Amino acid sequence: EVQLVESGGGLVQPGGSLRLSCVVSGFTFSSYWMSWVRQAPGKGLEWVANIQQDGSEKYYVDSVKGRFTISRDNAKNSLYLQLNSLTAEDTALYYCARGHLGEDYWGQGTLVTVSS
Amino acid sequence: DVVMTQSPLSLPVTLGQPASISCRSSQSLVNSDGNTYLNWFQQRPGQSPRRLIHKVSNRDSGVPDRFSGSGSGTDFTLKISRVEAEDVGVYYCMQATHWPWTFGQGTKVEIK
């Protein structure tokens, strides 16, 4: 069974940082692109970033470029998202998802709240 | 960025009746590789999104055959042939042809 489990969310002050993690199981992690997608409270979905199988290619939505960094550790079946210089507009449920041309499996999300 | 416009944004339907959601893109979604990366997702209340359809019309494993996708270029449709209670939720189209990937605003399907 494919599983994706996110963690690392929480309450952080504006300007602060967080590191999100996603541990996967049930498939060969190193064979797939992986993505992060977020959803602000009561709002729609926004693709954030994705990363190629070996980590050599990474893409970001403009609103997070230079502040967020996606990475992965294939030995640990883990995907990461480093969030820096956070603002209130980054408050959202962050989903880890498999794939990059239409993500087919999603985690349950981890909530990031940016507030003073 | 490619703008994805869904209509309607709210869709009250009667159980057993059909439903249709439109999704239009601001640019053609035909990729240079010949594929059209238009996907449909369902998000039930309190749940994570679930992919229903990929590349316009390919139903994902386990998705009931009452769901179907069609369209080409910039104009796409998700149809539910007979709505069931479990279909309540928000439906999103999403394009993965042009960076950055973008989603439609979502269409909320509810039972009348």
Image (spheres, helix red, strand yellow):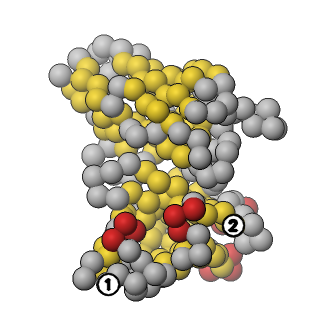
Q: Nearer the viewer, mark 1 or mark 2?
A: 1
Q: CA distance from mark 1 to mark 2?
A: 27 Å
Give the vertical position of B51 relative to A86 (above or below).
above
Residue depicted at x 57% and y 60% = A61
Mark 2 = which residue? A58
Quadrant position of residue A94: bottom left
Residue depicted at x 43% and y 31% = B6
The residue carrying pointer 1 sits among few (fewer than 14), some (14 to 19) or many (20 or more) residues within 10 Å by Cα, namely some
Q: Number of numbered discs present?
A: 2
Residue depicted at x 49% and y 81% = A84
Judge left or right: residue B48 versus residue A81: left
Which of the labelled discs sits on residue A37, or is there none? none
> Disc 2 marks which amino acid?
Lys
Chain letter of the residue carrying label 1? A
Q: Nearer the viewer, residue B4 or A41?
A: B4
Instruction: Locate residue B86, reporting x and y percent.
Output: 30, 33
Instruction: Locate residue A50, reporting x and y percent.
Output: 62, 62
Residue depicted at x 63% and y 44% = B96
The reply to whether residue B32 is in sight is yes
Give the vertical position of A55 relative to A27 (above or below).
below
Give the vertical position of B79 relative to B107 (above or below).
above
Q: Secondary structure at mark 2?
A: strand
